[in-house]
Amino acid sequence: MKKIFTLLATFMVAVSANSQTLLINNSSLTTHPGAGPSGTDVSATQTALGATLFGSGQNRATGYWMASKIIVPASGWMIDSLITYGYQTGSSLVSTFTGLYCYIGADSSSKPSSTVVIGSKTTNAMVSSVFSGIYRLPNETAPFTNTTRPIMKIKSTLTGSLSAGTYWVTWNATGSLASGPWNPPITVLGNLNTGTGTSDFQFVPTATPSPVWSPVMDGTSPQGLPFKLYGQGIAITGVKEQALVTSVSVGPNPMSNEAVVTIDAAGTNLSDLSFVVFDQLGRQVMTNNSITSSSFTIEKGNLATGNYIYKLSNKKDNSTLKAGKLIIQ
């Protein structure tokens, strides 16, 4: 008889997941701390170094996108939220941003792609938008009195799990003013090259002969894109390879209603193994502690669509033998 294990939304924590943390901090914008109006910070366009770029277009209405490369470690990440930065020329200190659209996309030959891993191209994910305390200035000459480009900090919801690999954090924005929205570059006093030329891109819909992802540049100097990415590191500890457990497959994956788990474990005592699935918060939502066959079926049950993590463990020493991602659609 086929043995079926249904995924139930229980709340037993078994994956060791760190509390929410700042996973990536690429938020360097200030060149002159406290030197702006009323003690605000200044992000100066360093004209003495040859800089001319105030900001890059991230206007959703005209089809622009920004993207920055990230590399997820072997343990994987559970993403919680994204913070980006932008301005609209002529804005007051009350943000004029009306939307932020973001997703984390797959890598395509070391460039961003349109393949969405988590997030959405079409859903407004903005939670809040407030003045960052930084003004973008046209040059580095004091006194700094220009207040036409207050930089806003935009927080957005971006949730899901990422397995190890290369991805692209991708976003664009909407606003109520005619100018922009614009995306200021990472700015470091005395350094014009704040990017690598291979890690930060802008999608230019007006490029000829066809739209293209182009490196963010100020003249010939590569620019980085400021953002912060929050979430949790998935600390699946004690992972070890064993010759008798060479692979675990789940198919189909993504699964709609049910999938078959197949363990290539010739010679292994199956009763020593445990198969567990966790949600994005590290909560155990399915377990099979009574494995008697090298293949068994799991069902979606009442679980929501999304990304999950599965692991195969040795019950004797609680070591993780294999781990991977399960997508439910």
Image: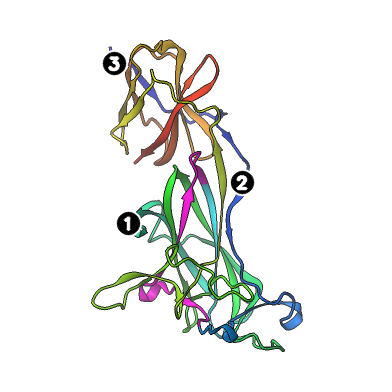
Label 2, label 3: how far apart the Cα atoms are: 40 Å
Secondary structure at numbered mark 1: loop
> Would you name the residue on which mark 3 appears?
2
Secondary structure at numbered mark 3: loop
Label 1, label 2: how far apart the Cα atoms are: 31 Å
Residue placed furthest toward the left: 209
Out of 146 and 178, give the one closest to the viewer: 146
Report x, y in % for residue 15.
Answer: 55, 31
Left or right placement of residue 261 versus residue 225 in this view: left
Out of 268 and 309, give the one closest to the viewer: 268
> Would you name the residue on which mark 1 appears?
109
Q: Amino acid at mark 2?
A: Gln
> Would you name the residue on which mark 2 appears?
20
Q: Tell us which disc is closer to us: 1 or 2.
A: 1
Residue 73 part of the magenta-drawn span: yes
The answer to whether residue 57 is seen in the rendering is no
Above or below 228: residue 270 = above
Residue 35, quarter of picture: bottom right
Bounds of the magenta span?
53-78
Which of the two labelled residues, at mark 1 and mark 3, occupies the earlier sequence position? 3
